[in-house]
């Protein structure tokens, strides 16, 4: 049986702003909910794979975590800065190719460089797998995470109708890009401070 704190921890970590949720909201605005679903399910599957990996390889992760933190954060933050630029440039008039939402595989792969996702799944593996079992934790995690990330994608989709005017959409994309840059700065600061 899952500890009651599992439900609050996973829900809070899944619903609060972070790279996944900012990208889901932005994709919802720019592409709509239906075209964002593959990315959303990729994020869900990617986090589940991370959780499984962290649960099975916990001893290895714990011994190497301190040395992995800064390099993993730098790689992840570099990717986040590149995504921030892509978000900022979305719908720019000089673009010749039509932008596309992140795919299922892209959503899965993104979790490998998402420091918030690594923090969350490592904590879940540490705190709950031994007492509840990996299958119960994976199922509980998926059931709690899915509505949280769906909410961000749906909110982006609902904003879409309000952002049909090019300058409004650009303002939204700029705000999301700057939010992602701020998140990246915070993660880099934390990683450097604790390394």
Image (tube, helix red, strand yellow):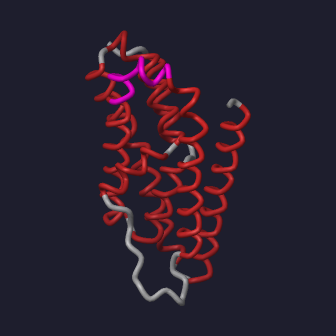
Q: Is residue 61 magenta?
A: yes
Q: Is residue 133 left or right of residue 91?
A: left
On the picture, is 20 further left or further right than 176? left
Q: In which quarter of the image is residue 181?
A: bottom right
User: Which residue corresponds to the image point at 51% horizontal and 66% vertical from the top-left?
Assistant: 159
Q: Is residue 43 magenta?
A: no
Quadrant where the C terminus is found in the figure: top right
What residue is shown at x 57% (from left), y 46% (from top)? Answer: 17
Instruction: Identify the residue at horizontal 38%, vertical 67% (top origin).
Output: 101
For residue 69, which quarter of the picture? top right
Total numbered circles: 0
Image coordinates for residue 26, horizontal then vertical, percent: 50, 63
Q: Position of residue 15 (x, y in %)?
A: 50, 41
Q: Looking at the image, which is closer to me, 113 or 66?
A: 66
Magenta residues span 53-63
Quarter of the image that includes the N terminus: top left
Label the magenta part by its dominant secondary structure: helix
* Left or right: 66 in relation to 120: right
Above or below, 122 against 76 in this view is above
Query: Which residue is outermost to the left?
Result: 135
At which x and y percent is residue 57?
36, 23
In the rendered view, would you say 105 is above or below 8? below
- Compared to 114, does 131 lie above or below? above
Q: Report x, y in % for residue 146.
A: 36, 42
**Front-lying residue, 151 or 123:** 123
Q: Residue drawn 48% across and 18% down?
A: 5
């Amino acid at each position: 049986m899952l500890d009651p704190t599992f439900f609050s921890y996973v829900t809070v970590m899944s619903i609060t702003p972070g790279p996944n949720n900012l990208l889901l909201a932005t994709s919802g605005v720019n592409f709509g909910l239906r075209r964002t679903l593959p990315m959303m399910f990729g994020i869900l599957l990617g986090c589940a794979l991370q959780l499984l990996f962290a649960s099975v390889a916990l001893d290895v992760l714990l011994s190497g975590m301190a040395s992995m933190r800064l390099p993993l954060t730098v790689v992840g933050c570099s990717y986040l800065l590149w995504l921030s630029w892509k978000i900022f440039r979305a719908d720019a008039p000089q673009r010749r190719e039509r932008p596309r939402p992140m795919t299922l595989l892209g959503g899965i792969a993104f979790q490998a460089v998402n420091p918030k996702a690594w923090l969350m799944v490592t904590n879940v593996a540490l705190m709950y797998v031994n007492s509840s079992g990996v299958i119960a934790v994976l199922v509980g995690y998926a059931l709690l995470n899915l509505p949280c990330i769906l909410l961000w994608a749906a909110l982006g989709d609902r904003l879409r109708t309000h952002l049909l005017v090019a300058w409004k959409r650009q303002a939204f994309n700029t705000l999301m890009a700057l939010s992602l840059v701020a998140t990246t700065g915070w993660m880099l600061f934390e990683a450097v401070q604790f390394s």
